[in-house]
Image (spheres, rainbow, N blue to C red):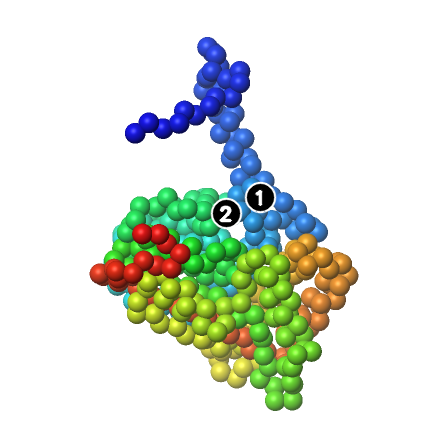
Amino acid sequence: MATPAIEAELNVGSDGDFDAESLNDSTASITSSIFERRYFQGRAYANPKYGRHWAPNDEEQLEALDIIHHWLTLMLKDKLYLAPIGDSPQRILDIGTGTGIWAINIADEFPSAVVIGTDIAPTQPSWVPPNVEFQIDDAQLDWTFQPESFDFIHIRYLQGSIDDWSKLYNQAYKALKPGGWIEHIEPDLQMLSENPDIDVGKDHIFTEWANTFRKVGETMGRNFDFSNGKLEELAKNAGMVNVTTEVHKIPVGSWPKNKKMKELGTFVALSFSQALDGFVKMPLCDILGWTPEEMQVFGAEMRRTLLNPKTRTVGYVFSSYAQKPLVPSQETPAGDSA
């Protein structure tokens, strides 16, 4: 079938135009642009040319992401995943891999598997296990992976990062082998208190925090709120089966008496302390239009209340895993075309 010709740029294509040096210069320019970052109020963010993200990706925030990875592993009882993926998955995809720490760990656990981690920014280390590959890719675009090529797809902490979650889940469905699994973890916006003397009402900073980030999401057209069974709904609407969800209660701080909960809470508090400045700057000042002073007062009150051991702060994390049917349903997943 004939295809339209690709129009050439004027003055390109004359004899002698092409040489290895010009190709290297072009490649270097593209590579350089990938590593370019946007700066806002002293923090570095991913180059918006390759995908927008509301949180910074500088060293301070990357350290927080690695701490979050550690306490999520503790939350899952020293596991990297919950889905029953078996003993020998062959291809694993980590969407929004961040620092790449989960992908590296899962590659060590399954050395015979090929592990691919994708992200909009090159924030992963260069020294990795031989079965790990990192790709700069925006998961919101059309996927180029072969259909039915992955045994396991992993997603976590992409709140506020995706315009169309249904599209992403439908693409994950296509990319999974029949019988393959998808797992997704997101935090709840609403923090609470275990102190019976503290009423987390509509005027409490925890409720103001949750409502503020709901407004950020509405303004951006991206969802921050995964309460009310959102993960289960996404999986079922995409055609997944054997959907299993769990709500994990986590302490913030070292106030719990139980040793394991105390350890978990200590790392949760550390990650919040490290990440909170990055959480609020762009969402509040750039997206909602707050002044830097308003943002600082809000962030300081949240930090003070959240980390005060008398508050006995608790939060919730939602997890879901689901399976692509061995025999696909006759119905087409929502948002897909026959």
* Residue 137, placed above or below residue 273: above
The residue carrying pointer 2 sits among few (fewer than 14), some (14 to 19) or many (20 or more) residues within 10 Å by Cα, namely many
- Quadrant holding the N terminus: top left
Q: Is residue 207 visible?
A: yes
Q: Which residue appears at 37% of the width and 54% of the height?
A: 336
**3D distance between C-alphas at marks 1 and 2:** 8 Å
Foreground of the two, 16 or 232: 232
* Residue 262, placed above or below residue 333: below
The three-letter amino acid code for the residue at tag 1 is: Asn
The x, y position of residue 75, in whole percent, is 45, 72
Dot 1 or dot 2, earlier in sequence: 1
Q: Element at badge 1?
A: loop
The answer to whether the residues at label 1 and label 2 have Cβ atoms under 8 Å apart is yes
* Residue 38, placed above or below residue 291: above
The x, y position of residue 108, in whole percent, is 34, 55
Horizontal side, residue 164 vs residue 111: left or right: right
Horizontal side, residue 176 vs residue 166: left or right: left
The three-letter amino acid code for the residue at tag 2 is: Ile
Residue at the top extreme of this rendering? 15
Q: Which residue appears at 31% of the width and 55% of the height?
A: 176
Q: State which quadrant residue 236 falls in.
A: bottom left
The residue carrying pointer 1 sits among few (fewer than 14), some (14 to 19) or many (20 or more) residues within 10 Å by Cα, namely some
The x, y position of residue 142, in whole percent, is 41, 46
Q: Is residue 71 visible?
A: no
Q: Which mark is residue 120?
A: 2
| Residue with the mark numbered 1 | 47
The x, y position of residue 133, in whole percent, is 38, 46
Residue at the left extreme of this rendering? 327
Q: Element at badge 2?
A: loop
Q: Which residue appears at 41% of the width and 24% of the height?
A: 5
Foreground of the two, 129 or 15: 15
